[in-house]
Amino acid sequence: MGSSGKSFADALNMAREISSPERLIQWSPSVGKSVAAPFVPSLLNLSLNCLARFPDEIATLELVPDNLRLRLINRMCDTRKMNAGVLKLLVEGSPTEIRVKNCSWLTQEQFQLTIGNFDTKELQVLQLDLCGQCMLDIAFKDILNKCQECFSRLTILSLRGACGLSDDGLRNLVKSAPLLRSINLGQCTLLTSDAVNCIADVLGSHLKELYIDECNKIDAMQILPAFKKFTCLEVLSVAEIHTINDQFVNGLVTASACGKILKDLDFTNCSGLTDNSLKTIGTTCDDLRSLDISNLNKLTDLGLEYLANGCRSIQTLKLCRNKFSDEAVAAFLESSGESLLELFLNGIAKVGPHTALSLAKYSRKLVYLDVSWCRKISDKGLGLIVDSCQSLKLLKIFGCMQINKGFLEGHSNPIVKIIGSRFTPIMDHLYVLEPEEEKFMRYRLLQY
């Protein structure tokens, strides 16, 4: 059972018996000085923002720690200031990490002059996302022709959005990187089922993370046998692959080698899934920490019951744009919500006072909450949540036109940042929860 000792069914029945849940919400704005102080960025953030505006004035990045490099490059990507000159600075020396989340500006020639010519002997992390202009098959073939062992220490690879990468190109790359533990190939539109089968053949006994979301040339049933070779897989994203169905989920978590150890699953927009998939996950994945089942219109309240009865360790749960009732979400939180750190309820139209009461009572560890477009949650409901969940650092309320300054200026949580209010600027909080030291792998990275 959860922290309340109640089963999902008992909690749901009790919620349904309450005729006016809003009356049970006892909260009023604090009297006196508001704790909602104006947002003041740190000196470090101000410095990074300033540097990101003038990338051509940066002479070197050689002595800058990897975590600060990443934060700076992310800002350049967000403001479209990233360019080949900065990439050249990143590859100077023998870096252990190259991370660029938006390479849409990168041409084939620029790739060859920078990535194609630097010393990769120490490289452990390579992220070149959205490099759609580059024919990566040719680019990586040229690199490997110079040195077959150039990626011998590579542990993490992200080529998200590389629409010039084919099965053959990936095969050559994977065979040259025996230490790979995390591969992100999301939105690589040329890849087929053969790519996943190749990864399983070469890295099956070592790979821990695989992202193949939005690769719609991949047929779910054709790759299902490959998961019998993934003996260590902890993270899998197959979001928006339209061939994903209940049969695939059943085979993945009950028949595959990795089913019992999966910690993170993303099924966003896999519209063929039903409550049966959640039943399979709930009865098998005892150690699941993160689940994204956003925008699955065939799910019902019964699916939440299956999850609540089996998955007791979920820390991140994304239920966005589903049809769950207010009572069912509340019952889940009451029976299994104690360990939640992040909860995404964006666009669940029925979420309201029942959910607010349960969040305030049973999800005290919550750090991140998104209730955007949940217009049945009142000022009093949000006030009760924010004042009760003292660990809450970020609250998103986009589209919640019912929320007024009584809540914004009257809550008593000094650490929470509220984004999406019509009364406050959005951009002020752009990097409010940016980690000081970002780890690329979701759970753990082995040392070699």
Image (tube, rainbow, N blue to C red):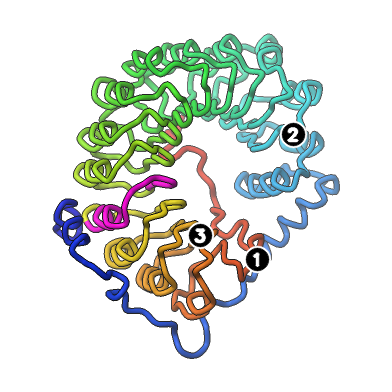
Q: Is residue 9 above or below residue 133?
A: below
Residue type, numbered disc 3: Lys
Residue at 67% over, 11% down:
141
Q: Is residue 110 above or below residue 33?
A: above
Residue at 27% over, 35% down:
275
Question: In the rendered structure, are the residues bearing label 1 and label 2 in contact, judged by CB atoms less than 8 Å apart?
Answer: no
For this rendering, which residue is in front, 14 or 209? 14
Q: Is residue 213 above or below residue 313?
A: above
Q: Which mark is residue 396?
A: 3
For this rendering, which residue is in front, 109 or 300? 300
Left or right of residue 43: residue 112: right
Left or right of residue 317: residue 13: left
Residue 246, image x and y in percent? 31, 26
Find the distance from the CA under tag 1 to the CA under tag 2. 38 Å
Residue 119, image x and y in percent? 69, 25
Residue type, numbered disc 1: Pro
* Secondary structure beneath label 3: strand
Question: In the rendered structure, are the residues bearing label 1 and label 3 in contact, judged by CB atoms less than 8 Å apart?
Answer: no
Does label 1 or label 3 sit earlier along the sequence? 3
In the rendered image, which residue does mark 1 sit on? Answer: 425
In the rendered image, which residue does mark 2 sit on? Answer: 92
Find the distance from the CA under tag 2 to the CA under tag 3. 40 Å
Give the quadrant of residue 337.
Answer: bottom left
Does label 2 or label 3 sit earlier along the sequence? 2
Instruction: Please identify the residue farthest to the right as the structure is shown.
Output: 57
Residue type, numbered disc 2: Glu
For this rendering, which residue is in front, 5 or 357? 357
Q: Which portion, as a residue range, is magenta?
A: 317-334
Residue at 62% over, 69% down:
424
Give the class, few, some or many, for how many residues have Cα within 10 Å of label 1's Cα (few <14, many ≥20): few
Residue 321 in view, yes or no? yes
Give the class, few, some or many, for how many residues have Cα within 10 Å of label 2's Cα (few <14, many ≥20): some
